[in-house]
Structures are given as structure tokens and as C-alpha cells.
Image (cartoon, rainbow, N blue to C red):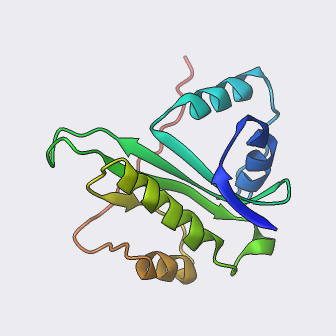
Amino acid sequence: MLKLRLAQENDLAGILRLYTHLNNNSLPVIDRNVKEVWKNILCDNNRHTIIACDDDSVVASATLFINQSLVQGQRPFALVEYVVTHPNYRGQGLAKKLLNKALDIAQENNCYKIMLVTGQSDERVHNLYQKMGYKSQGKTAYVKELEERLY
């Protein structure tokens, strides 16, 4: 049975496995550094990792970031990232459920807007976001990848 909830400490391995389906990420070794990053993510009250589980398996996720702002009456804005569904579970409406939960959290936090940036070229992905009310008119997203500098 599929269940939607916020990620917890013991979800790390499942989320990392799911993320291998996000832009061909490789599965990292769960070492001390990875555990420390995960601990920091879970402690961040402005970051919400929403997951869909089939029994104990993480099969979809989305992350919502709440960002403080000095505009719009000092109301925060929200950003959605890392929307991914395991290929075996696509087409079941999980992304829509995750995005609706993210929207609920953004509204609970008095956000004045919610943004989503995708690197996917699949037209179905864009159609989903548009059906969910996301618009690209008037906005352009730019991304600059930062590479680690070796000295």
C-alpha cells in the first residue's frame, strides 16, 4: 500500500536508491559524510523531503525548500526540487500527490509563491507541471554548475 509522508532518518538508503533514477545519479557509499549530510537535511526546518513508500520501499520523492524573503511583505517563497518517481511506479499520480503535499506545506508556511525548476526534456513531465498550475511564462531559469576546484 502506498503512503505519503515526510522522510525520516531510516529512509536514507531508499532515497539514495531512488535518486539513481534522477539524472543518472550514481549510488554513493553511505559513509560518515553522507550520514552527516542526511542528518543536517532532516534538522533543517526549511527543507521538507516528501516521500511515497510502498511498504518500506521509497518509490517517489520531492523536496520543498522554504526561503526567507525581504519582499512581498517579508513572506517566504518555496522551491521544489528533486521530483523523482521510480520507473516502475510512474503513471500512478505519485508526482501529483507529492506536488500537492509540497503546495500544502508552502501554504502552511505563508509562502507567496512556489517555484519548480526541471532539467527534464520529457514533454509528459512538462505537461504534468503545467496541469498542476506551474507556468513558465515571464520567467527564465538559468543554472550554472559549480565544479570543485582542486588546488
- Residue at the image point whose x is 65% and y is 53% from the top: 5
Q: Is residue 80 above or below residue 7?
A: below
Q: Nearer the viewer, residue 52 or 15?
A: 52
Label tally: 0
Residue 95: percent from left, percent from top:
60, 69
Residue 24: percent from left, percent from top:
71, 57
- Residue at the image point whose x is 69% and y is 81% from the top: 91
Q: As drawn, which residue projects farthest toward the top?
A: 151
Residue 13: percent from left, percent from top:
81, 42
Residue 110: percent from left, percent from top:
30, 50
State whether residue 26 appears in this view.
Answer: no
Q: Nearer the viewer, residue 103 or 145?
A: 103
State whether residue 143 appears in this view.
Answer: yes
**Quarter placement of the N terminus:** bottom right
Residue 69: image quadrant is top left
**Quarter placement of the C terminus:** top right
Please give left or right for residue 121 compared with residue 16 in the image. Answer: left
Q: Is residue 59 above or below residue 19?
A: below
